Amino acid sequence: MQAQQQPRWRTSSHSGSQSDCVEVACEPDVVSIRDTKNRDGGTLVVDRAAFGAFVKAVKTERL
């Protein structure tokens, strides 16, 4: 039985030193999202396609 790996969380490079940001962890089928200031406060999990569509909308300023 293989041990389950912990997600590799990262913060956007656009966040700089600000504390008002989120962290994401990309896994094979999903992307997990959490609040940097409250890491134990829960995690939002979405499928990769939905997250990709969200990021694209943000980058093209549709949101």
Image: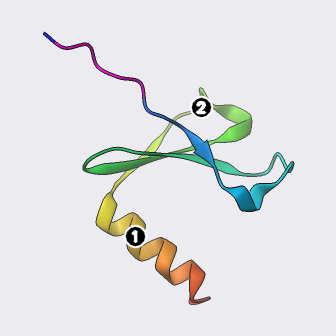
Could you tell me the amino acid type at mark 1? Gly
Give the vertical position of 55 relative to 10 (above or below): below
Query: Crowding at label 1, few (<14), some or many (≥20) Cα neighbours within 10 Å?
Result: few
* Residue bearing mark 1: 52
Q: Splitting the image into 4 quarters, where does residue 35 fall?
A: top right
Instruction: Determine if the magenta segment contains residue 7.
Output: no
Assess disc 2: are there few (<14), some (14-19) or many (≥20) residues with their C-alpha within 10 Å of its C-alpha. few
Tag of residue 61? none
Give the residue drawn at x 74%, y 36%: 37
Residue at 54% x, 38% y is: 9
Which residue is identified by label 2?
Answer: 41
Report the residue that reaches farthest toward the top: 1
**In the rendered image, the vertical position of residue 58 relative to residue 24, given as above or below:** below
Instruction: Label 2: state its secondary structure.
Output: loop
> At x 68% / y 33%, what residue is drawn?
38
Looking at the image, residue 56 sits to the left or right of residue 21; the answer is left
The residue drawn where x is 25% and y is 50% is: 29
Q: Position of residue 23 (x, y in %)?
A: 60, 45
Q: Of callouts 1 and 2, which one flags the residue occurring earlier in the amino acid sequence?
A: 2
Q: Which quadrant is home to the N terminus?
A: top left
In front: label 1 or label 2 = 1
Q: What is the secondary structure assignment of the residue under circle 1? A: helix
Q: Amino acid at mark 2?
A: Gly
Residue extent of the magenta highlight: 2-6
Q: Nearer the viewer, residue 9 or 44?
A: 9
Asked whether 5 falls inside the magenta stretch, the response is: yes
